[in-house]
Image (tube, grey):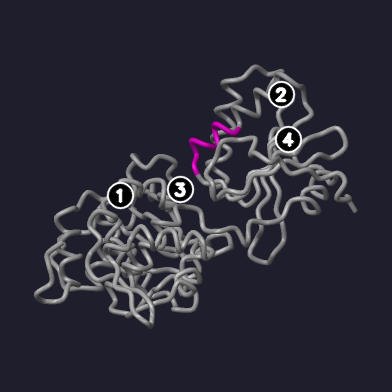
Amino acid sequence: MIGDQNKTWSATPFFTCDSNIGVARYKVMDRMLHCIRGAREIGRLRGYLLEHAGLIIEEGPSHSLVLRDPQHTPEAIEEVWNLCVRAFKEEVIVNMRLIVARTSKNGEIEFEGFPSEVTEEESREIIELIPESKGLQPIGNSAHEVLRVLMIRWFLRLGTTTLTKLGEDSGYTYKPVRQAVDKLKPYLFSGTRGIELKAFPREAWSRLILDTETVRETRFFHAKGEFPRTPAAMLDRFYQLSRNETEHVGIGGVAGAQGHQDIDLIGMPRLDFSVHCAGTDPDLDFLRKLDPALEPVSSPTSPCSVVVHLLRRPGNFFQDRLADPVECLLDLHEMRLDKQAREFALSFQPVGEAKI
């Protein structure tokens, strides 16, 4: 067993990263393990590897970069590694060490190593030293996440809630929830039973829209076969799947908005899903049953027929296989359907209330 005397935590993260991503350094004999837990942005992954390469050049092969439960697909990580192979000299690449450790659905840890396979000694060190990402707060922005939960409750007329319940639903502790609520005071009604939105929070919502690319964790898929299924055809197949195997999935986008409210949305440019995966790897097995030809797309600007948004907060608020209204609204904005998004939001407002 590796004792505590061999483990050191850095007071300041060695890598520049999101505040909600766990970062730590572990010293094992004469080597340093730099661990990034819950990393999700491809651009930052490139930055991690660039800094890692700088360490190798300056200090030699005594450093390893460990990605613990990253949110990138294996294909995306391999693609970034291959970019490094083409960018750096061979003497740098052979001394770099990237280890990916993922917690599988059955709780076991699966390893992948670059440029070579993970050794038994390395896997033992990681299992004993580096905790899994469960228990980390959701990746994102606590103010935005609390806003989203409050808006869901407002759209669905769920009534007042407490700060404790807000924390349970959003996945954040009391302090960040309190801070988020304080910022939203102009939009809130506060009573003896709790708080709730009293009107659509236009300014706060606008800030969320501006930050949506960093707040939401999104994956893109496209069928490259000769006869790919249309989004509408894949939606039909989704409804044929049992509720048990898709209970963690909510339909979003155009289809989800139409499921919530009878609004005029013509056509379905893509099929959006929200996948609930609080503290676990996302289960995307259902996609193969929609169209076996679906493959991940690395760039959001490439053609895509299916888009998956990962929900890592504890509460998902799915109803009748539909994602929550806020997820659907964000999807519409993401597709640049701003007019339709406004119509969708207005459809939830009580008669006589000030327009959005």
Going from N to C along the chain, the mark reached first, 2 or 1, is 2
Q: Is residue 45 magenta?
A: yes
Q: Which mark is residue 207?
A: 1
Is the residue marked by circle 3 packed among few (<14), some (14-19), or many (20+) residues within 10 Å?
some
Q: CA distance from mark 4 to mark 2?
A: 9 Å
The residue at the point 50 percent across, 53 percent down is 139
Identity, as a three-letter code, of the amino acid under mark 2 = Ile
**Which residue occupies the foreground of this view, 321 or 303?**
321
Is the residue marked by circle 4 packed among few (<14), some (14-19), or many (20+) residues within 10 Å?
many
The residue at the point 27 percent across, 61 percent down is 329
Tell me if label 3 and label 1 are in contact, CB under 8 Å.
no
Going from N to C along the chain, the mark reached first, 3 or 2, is 2
Identity, as a three-letter code, of the amino acid under mark 4 = Ser
Q: Specify the segment rendered in magenta.
A: 41-48
Circle 2 residue: 56
Going from N to C along the chain, the mark reached first, 1 or 4, is 4
Circle 3 residue: 296
x then y, percent, for residue 59? 75, 21
Badge 1 marks a residue whose secondary structure is helix
x then y, percent, for residue 312? 50, 61
Q: CA distance from mark 3 to mark 2?
A: 32 Å
x then y, percent, for residue 338? 18, 53
Going from N to C along the chain, the mark reached first, 4 or 2, is 2
Against 10, is 158 above or below? below
